[in-house]
Image (spheres, helix red, strand yellow):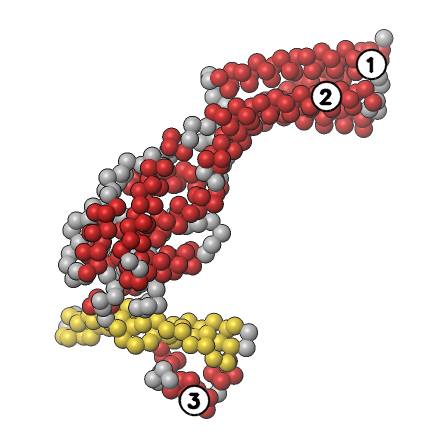
Amino acid sequence: MDKKLKQFFVKSFVVLLIIHLGYFLYGYFKFEGIGKVNIYTEFYRFKFYDDVSISHFFISGLFLLFFLIFLIKNHSKKQYAFPNLLKIGGLLLLVSFFTFSFFVSYSFGLNAGLRSELSEKDFNKDKTVLNVLRPFLYGYTSYSSEKLFNPVNILYPKPYPVIEVVDSTLISGQYYSVEYNYYSIDTLKMLTTDLNKVSAATSTVLDSIGFGKKELLERIIKKNSIKDSTEIIYKGQRVNPDYDPNICIFIKNKALYKPVKGIPVEKQQYDAAVKRYKLLYKSKEDSLLYSFHQLDTLLKKYKIETYIVPKDLVKDVVYFKNHNTELLNTIRNDFDRKALTDKLDTLERLFYQPNYLHPSIMAIFFGVIGLVWLILFLIYILFNYKRKQV
């Protein structure tokens, strides 16, 4: 390619980049805010009838018209070898792609508008608040669910995490007596060589937990090797969490509202359980009140309809914490739960699965690019060939 043709392509790409920047800024300022984000929200796809699509159609058409006129008029006289024609064809393909992808830059602008209002860091903070407060936010009928609220969900080691052991005893015929027992889950670390030696297994290390090697092996839940040591997770003492004054119904749930990306779910469940336990049993009521004020602010930020009054919710939580055996049949935590779930699901998708080029138009998009590129390339070759003949 000669120098003038190269300069022409450079100028063409500069013009295209300026138009893309314009669409990006348009998308950025067109974003309507997270309050209007709902489950149907998606980044832009070419719709053929709105302002973005109509302007896109005319701007793309005008650009290609003038591009083709100047290309044929000023740059189709020189004879090029086949390798150079391939290079020109490749550049024409890029021109076609950038000419029909202005709406993609518009989508990037919408994404930038979203992130300017709600950064990923702030989004994760909001999810963390919801994860800690999740057990306080169910509808009152959910608190009778043994699947959602049960001792096995207890995670914080003080009082203790527990494991359920079901023992059944045959009474007569097909009748069994079923007994549910709970044991604390404890951890022991010791050198692997010591564990493998019978003499070492009866040492003071095992004596200190109240049983020897044989009983320990029967109680093992899981073993993890860490360099030259072994971490043993085992059933400890028999406990009764249903009657422990340090375990209320709000401790018996480990579900997360929405996990934070990049952090193991188990760690998030544990950390949330620790914070929740401290709010209930270690901190003053002011800390719990502050957390519910955070919740109230969060719901209003996302434009979720809410009837929560933080002071009233604190009173209800404290009451049912102190009346552990009483059935929880009312709690003043009403808000639009479905709207919040839909909002979080949509924001999660917009942050981590944005779909700047919607799958429903992908085939049409690349088909148009391929067709336009073929027309441009064939026209250029035709005029180039005719002018060589002249």
For marks 1 and 2 on the same chain, the one whose residue lies earlier in the sequence:
2
Question: Residue 354 at x, y = what percent?
Answer: 49, 36
147 relative to 214, above or below: above
Which of the 4 image quarters holds residue 37?
A: top left
Quadrant where the C terminus is found in the figure: top right
Q: Say few, some or many: other residues with alpha carbon within 10 Å of mark 2 (under 14 / 14 to 19 / 20 or more).
A: few
Mark 3 / mark 2, whichever is N-terminal: 2
Relative to 185, say whether 87 is above or below. above
Write the residue at 36% across / 37% down. 301
Q: CA distance from mark 3 to mark 1?
A: 95 Å
Residue type at mark 3 is Ser
Mark 3 or 1, nearer chain start:
1
Spot occupied by residue 171 in the image (x, y as percentages of width and height): 15, 75
Does any portion of residue 364 appear in the rendered image?
A: no
User: Which quadrant holds the N terminus?
Assistant: top right
Disc on res. 11: 2
Position of 306 with respect to 224 (left or right) is left
Answer above or below: position of 344 versus 276. above
User: Left or right: where does residue 204 sit relative to residue 364?
Assistant: left
Which picture quadrant has residue 270? bottom left
Q: Which amino acid type corresponds to the residue marked 2 in the rendered image? A: Lys
Q: Amino acid at mark 1?
A: Lys
Q: Which mark is residue 77?
A: 1
Inter-mark Cα distance, 3 to 2? 82 Å
Instruction: Classify 10 Å Cα crowding around label 3: few (below 14), some (14-19), many (20 and above).
Output: some
**Which residue in the structure is indicated by mark 3?**
203
Percent position (x, y) of residue 298? Answer: 35, 41
Residue 13 drawn at (x, y percent): 69, 24
Mark 3–mark 2 CB contact (< 8 Å)? no
Tell me the crowding category of disc 1: few under 14, some 14 to 19, or many 20 or more residues within 10 angstroms, Cα based: some
**Residue at (47%, 80%) from the top-left corner?**
190
Tell me the SS state at disc 1: loop
